[in-house]
Image: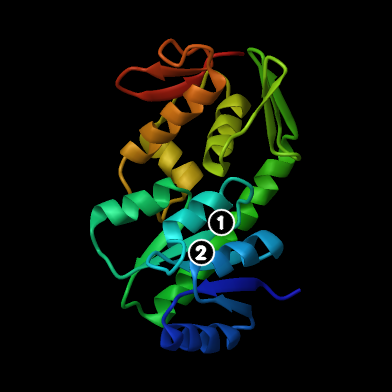
Amino acid sequence: MAIRILLVDDEPLILKGLRFSLQQEGYEIDTAADGEEALAKILGNPYDLVLLDVMLPKLSGVEVCQRVRETSDVPIIMLTAKGEDMDKILGLEYGADDYMVKPFNILEVKARIKTILRRASGRREEKKQQLQLSGGGLFLDTAARSVEADGKPVNLTVKEFDLLQLFMANPGRVFTREDLLETIWGPDYFGDFRTVDVHIRRLREKIEADPAKPQHILTKWGIGYYFGHA
């Protein structure tokens, strides 16, 4: 089956150019011109990848990305006309897999798409290897992408789930922030370590009885984080 990509931008010329170029690569292309339309299409269709502009009418690209990440791990590349670091960090912290700053070269777009799709395929294969993990009152089902803490369901974002799965699959192993960025966000991500710390804090708030005194995700001071149950 052809790979399905959703292009989201409110500039018709950009949509037209991207659509034509990507169709030449054999991709099946759909488009949306505002955030509400994009959100409806992403939640209602099985896309393999989304190119999502940050500045959109009705809902911003960041808002769309955040809401999609509540239920879907579809790869998302953010498109932005702004080059400030905070825009890039914000987009990636809300669940984007990568970003590109306008104006961009179509050859680079194609290369990024291939990299993200290859990475997504690799992750799916890795996740098939371990279906259920448990420890310290936590139960994680990778097939259902569900988590329970002391028998109660926990609602995690995609990145939070991936972090917890990595920790639980490797109890006692200390992961540096660099390790986590490369494994969870991918080797092409150039954000800083604050992204990791923010996600660890949010994860602890959801799975720890007392986030200030964590029992599951522990800190090895000066090095990184690890899962504290064998």
Circle 2 sits in a helix, a strand or a loop, which is it?
helix
Single out the residue that lies furthest toward the left. 84
Q: Quadrant of the N terminus?
A: bottom right
Q: CA distance from mark 2 to mark 1?
A: 6 Å
Look at the picture and state if 168 lies above or below 21.
Answer: above
The residue positioned 66% from the left and 59% from the top of the image is 43
Residue 169 rendering spot, x and y as whole percentages: 62, 28
Look at the picture and state if 46 lies above or below 86.
Answer: below
Residue type at tag 1: Arg
Residue 192 rendering spot, x and y as whole percentages: 30, 43
The residue positioned 55% from the left and 27% from the top of the image is 167
Single out the residue that lies furthest toward the front. 58
Query: Can residue 146 be seen?
Result: yes
> How many labels, in total?
2
Tag 2 residue: 115
Label 1 near label 2: C-beta < 8 Å?
yes
**Mark 1: few, some, or many residues within 10 Å (few <14, many ≥20)?**
some
The residue positioned 48% from the left and 76% from the top of the image is 110
Res. 36 mark: none
Pick the front one: 25 or 17: 17
Tag 1 residue: 119
Left or right: residue 197 versus residue 73 is left
Residue 198 lies in quadrant? top left
Circle 1 sits in a helix, a strand or a loop, which is it?
helix
Left or right: residue 157 versus residue 92 is right
The residue positioned 63% from the left and 12% from the top of the image is 136
Residue 222 rendering spot, x and y as whole percentages: 29, 21
Query: Can residue 48 be seen?
Result: no
